[in-house]
């Protein structure tokens, strides 16, 4: 299996049609079909189920499609990084970020960095903390901007200031007197919507003050949590900066006065893996 075969397979997987894939790749159909057959024989699996209408990816095919995209992107990124290794103020900066931190922190940092180094190109990827850490481990990005808690064992870290969690509610529901802050006990018996990665932290904190939280919905994305909150189904629990992701949705955020519920944004990169000169320079902004 080589890069050419993976590119051929991706074209077939995306079009689900040998003829269309061949046109996309500017090759004839027979050799493309032959390469797919050789790839399946080498792996010992069926990658696509053929029918008279449309090809369908098998589970093995779906896995290979996912990995092939990562392999090709990693190869292309590696070539760019090596070419730009000694260019100083030139090159590619690849960053992954969680939505809340990226929306608040990155625009200003990127803008200032770009003013100083206008020949830098940026590759940005957004996702939850676990996705960003996976991209780091797989070499798809050099720097991640994520939120605690997570397993820090394999990463170098720069901790940014802590911030409280807030209760986000629709303006016409819950806490009509609009307090600036509430205690954790004020959430007792109220329907809560939260990021599932904070479930243990929130549940443990609630237990410490004497009640079991009523969690009606868990998600993996702060924007989704805010959208569900806007429907009126419950109270969203998110980091303070995440509440700013939907400023025009008639939502209000109330600080939860509980030190155990503080969260922190962290700049991370993989230990014992060389960084490009561009990434090293960018990190100086945070180290200082």
Image (tube, rainbow, N blue to C red):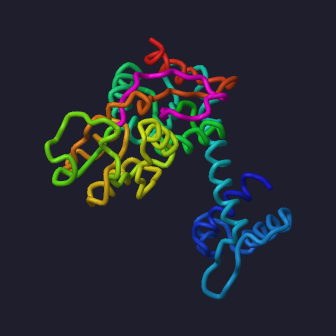
**Residue at the image position 37 percent from the left and 25 percent from the top:** 109
Q: Residue furthest front?
A: 210
Residue 89: x and y in percent read 48, 20
From what the image shows, is residue 43 above or below residue 171? below
Vertical placement of 232 versus 156: above or below?
below
Please tell me in which quadrant of the rendered image residue 183 appears.
top left
User: Which residue does the image show at 42% across and 54% down from the upper left?
Assistant: 215
Q: Nearer the viewer, residue 25 or 141?
A: 141
- Position of the N terminus, as image quadrant, is bottom right
Look at the image and say whether residue 114 sits in the magenta stretch: no
Residue at point 40%, 53% (across, down): 214
Query: Which image quadrant for residue 45?
Result: bottom right
Residue 275 position, x and y percent, is 61, 24
Q: Quadrant of residue 12?
A: bottom right
| Residue in front for this viewpoint, 41 or 250 | 250
Side of 235 relative to 39 (left or right):
left
Magenta highlight range: 145-165
Q: Is residue 153 magenta?
A: yes
Left or right: residue 241 versus residue 119 is left
Residue 264 image point, x, y percent: 44, 29
Question: What predominant SS class does the magenta segment belong to?
Answer: strand
Image coords of residue 37 (percent x, y):
80, 71
């Amino acid at each position: 299996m080589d890069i050419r075969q993976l590119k051929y397979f991706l074209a077939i997987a995306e079009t689900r049609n040998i003829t269309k894939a061949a046109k996309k790749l500017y090759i004839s159909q027979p050799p493309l079909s032959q390469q797919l057959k050789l790839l399946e024989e080498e792996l010992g699996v069926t990658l696509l189920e053929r029918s008279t209408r449309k090809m369908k990816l098998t589970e093995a095919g779906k896995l290979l499609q996912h990995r092939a995209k990562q392999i090709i992107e990693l190869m292309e990124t590696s070539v760019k990084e090596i070419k730009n290794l000694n260019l100083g103020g030139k090159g590619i900066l690849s960053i992954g970020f969680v939505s809340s931190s990226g929306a608040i922190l990155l625009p200003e940092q990127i803008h200032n960095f770009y003013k100083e180094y206008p020949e830098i190109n940026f590759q940005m990827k957004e996702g939850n903390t676990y996705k960003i850490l996976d991209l780091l481990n797989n070499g798809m990005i050099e720097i991640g901007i994520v939120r605690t808690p997570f397993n820090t064992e394999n990463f170098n870290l720069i901790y940014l200031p802590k911030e409280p969690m807030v209760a986000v509610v629709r303006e016409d529901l819950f806490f009509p007197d609009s307090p600036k802050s509430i205690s954790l006990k004020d959430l007792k018996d109220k329907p809560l919507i939260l990021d599932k990665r904070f479930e243990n932290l929130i549940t443990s904190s609630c237990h410490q003050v004497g009640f079991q939280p009523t969690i009606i919905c868990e998600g993996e994305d702060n924007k989704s949590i805010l959208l569900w909150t806007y429907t009126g189904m419950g109270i969203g629990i998110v980091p303070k900066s995440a509440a700013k992701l939907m400023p025009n949705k008639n939502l209000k955020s109330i600080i939860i006065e509980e030190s155990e519920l503080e969260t922190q944004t962290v700049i991370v990169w993989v230990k014992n893996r060389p960084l490009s000169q561009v990434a090293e320079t960018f990190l100086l902004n945070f180290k200082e």
